[in-house]
Amino acid sequence: MEWRRFHTLLTPDEMGQADRITIRRGVSGFVLMKAAGNRVAEAALKMIGDIGTGGTCRIACLGGPGNNGGDAFVAAELLRRSGHSVVVHTLSKPECLSGDAALAAGYYEGTVEPLDTFEPEKTDLVIDGLLGAGLSRPIEGDVAALIARTNTAAPRLLAIDLPSGVSGKSGAILGDAFQAERTVSFFRAKPGHFLEPGRTRCGSVDIRQIGIEANVLDTIRPKAFLNQPELWRLQLNLPAGAGHKYDRGHAVVFSGPALKTGAARLAANAALRAGAGLVTLLSPPNAILVNASHLTAVMLRKCEGSGDLGEILVDHRFNAFVLGPGFGTGERVRDYARLVLEAGRALVLDADGISAFSDVRNILFDNEKQPSEGEGVRLVLTPHAGEFARLFPDIAEADRLSKLDRARQAAERANAVIVLKGRDTVIASPDGRAVINANGTPWLATAGTGDVLSGIIAAQLAQGMPAFEAAAAGVWMHGRAAELFGPGLTAEELAGQLPRVFVELMEA
Ligand SMILES: NC(=O)C1=CN([C@@H]2O[C@H](COP(=O)(O)OP(=O)(O)OC[C@H]3O[C@@H](n4cnc5c(N)ncnc54)[C@H](OP(=O)(O)O)[C@@H]3O)[C@@H](O)[C@H]2O)[C@@H](O)CC1
Ligand SMILES: Nc1ncnc2c1ncn2[C@@H]1O[C@H](COP(=O)(O)OP(=O)(O)O)[C@@H](O)[C@H]1O
Ligand SMILES: [K+]
């Protein structure tokens, strides 16, 4: 894997490693810090430009005890030289700083005042260099009070690396955290820039280069990425010139009973739009008529129990299944899931399909132990936070774990690809790879969009995409479809945007 080609995310520890490798190669830490301070000053000048006074701006730089504070001193000096009115407010006296941060404090020739003289209401721009990657415990006391006071005053705020209080590893807020308008970080983004609530606190995130070479990633070998098409585009199947519909797979969706059929149809229609050559809805007899009256290109077939499903599974062209949307949580889900997996088919288990296993979790996990040699993972679980907690209560309750770690641990336990949904959906594979998805809009928070997602993922599985890539591609396409539709989205409209998503993917 060529790590540098992708949108790698580095934990603060991995970022420290990148830093150390670079320093060992002969670039001094202070040179990196000066580059970082420069990038911060550039971002600040851009923000000041937005203010548009054209005159001198009042800039307050908040400097902490470590290198994040060092970056703030460098930026402060550059902004001071640009003619702005700059004050650095420090947590500890500058003479208490050490290493590169001490050099940076020496580089700064302007005014230094203690932190408690900082008045957020009397500044045009605040630059937060209190704490960055070195945040090691919850922020308390005077600093926490200052953050709360600043957030209430809501000045324009530029965070260096991360808003103080946001964990770069998990996106968690330790104690309290600044609300930034913009965050400038260096070399590569961190999970905390994309995992909530950190993502919201960061505002817009700008990743700038400071002289760390991309090939340090060959040593670090990161396993977390931002979900971008480059990760899976090569495995995405588009119809071949002389292709046949059976080349594009046959997705199958299980319908719920007569009064709960909509969710399955949303999944089935989405699977067809998302590229499956054929889609069949398997319906209980009492729902056949209601399903028939709503379906056109999607085919319909009766499935009354395990016997019927067994007959269907004899036909190997049915290769990817969706079970759960609107289905109910009874014994039948468990039987169907077992039969589909035992028959070696891909399965997206969603919604009720996940909840049905909450009291008998090990049945699912044992079922899906190791696929035989040479076979990939076939099971994709798509829980939202509530469903996740039902299936993995101990992992959900472990506060110290990030959403990334939670999804990874669950993936390993279930030997399944986990799609842990939300604004910051994480997709994790049992082999440790994980991506964080960042596209989509809040308009996705509407009934039925999860059902559409399960259909989109099933379509990629039906076309033979490996499960991790199918899930990552499906989540990205789903988010992009929502962006293209814009405000007022309902689940029915989502799949209708997929043609535009394909156009973009084909043109890129
Ligand atoms: N890596 C790179 O490539 C580059 C990194 N750069 C910059 O370096 C930054 C990382 O610097 P860093 O490691 O010195 O950590 P930083 O965030 O300044 O804080 C550590 C200090 O804070 C303290 N402290 C911790 N938690 C606390 C709390 N809750 N409340 C109060 N104090 C707390 C902690 O105390 P301790 O835990 O040791 O007791 C320690 O004294 C990084 O974010 C980026 O801006 C750039 O210069 C360019 C290249
Ligand atoms: N605020 C948000 N921003 C982006 N995506 C969101 C947001 N809220 C929900 N989503 C996405 O919308 C979908 C909702 O799925 P789910 O909770 O299963 O809903 P339903 O069961 O109604 O289909 C998921 O893909 C989720 O990631
Ligand atoms: K900061």
Image: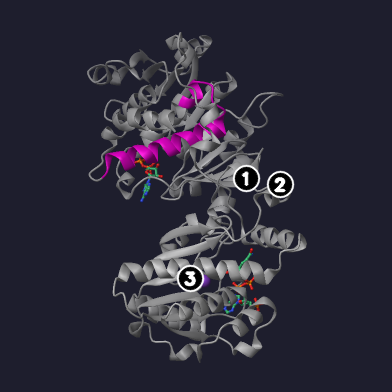
- Depth check, mark 2 against mark 3: the one in front is 3
Residue topped by disc 2? 218
The residue lying at 48 percent from left, 30 percent from top is: 348
Question: Does dot 1 land on a helix, a strand or a loop?
Answer: helix
At label 3, counting other C-alpha atoms closer than 10 Å, the crowd grade (few under 14, some 14-19, many 20 or more) is: many
Does the Cβ of the disc 2 residue fall within 8 Å of ligand 1? no
136 relative to 482, above or below = below
Note whether residue 369 is visible: yes
Residue topped by disc 1? 4
Query: Amino acid under label 2?
Result: Asp
Of the pair 338 and 144, the residue shown nearer to us = 144
Assess whether residue 217 is covered by the magenta stretch: no
- In the figure, is residue 127 to the left or right of 345? left
Which picture quadrant has residue 66? bottom right
Image quarter for ligand 1: bottom right
Assess whether residue 465 is covered by the magenta stretch: yes
At label 1, counting other C-alpha atoms closer than 10 Å, the crowd grade (few under 14, some 14-19, many 20 or more) is: some
Position of residue 164 measured from the top left corner of the image (x, y, whole percent) = 51, 72
Residue topped by disc 3? 41
Question: Does dot 3 land on a helix, a strand or a loop?
Answer: helix
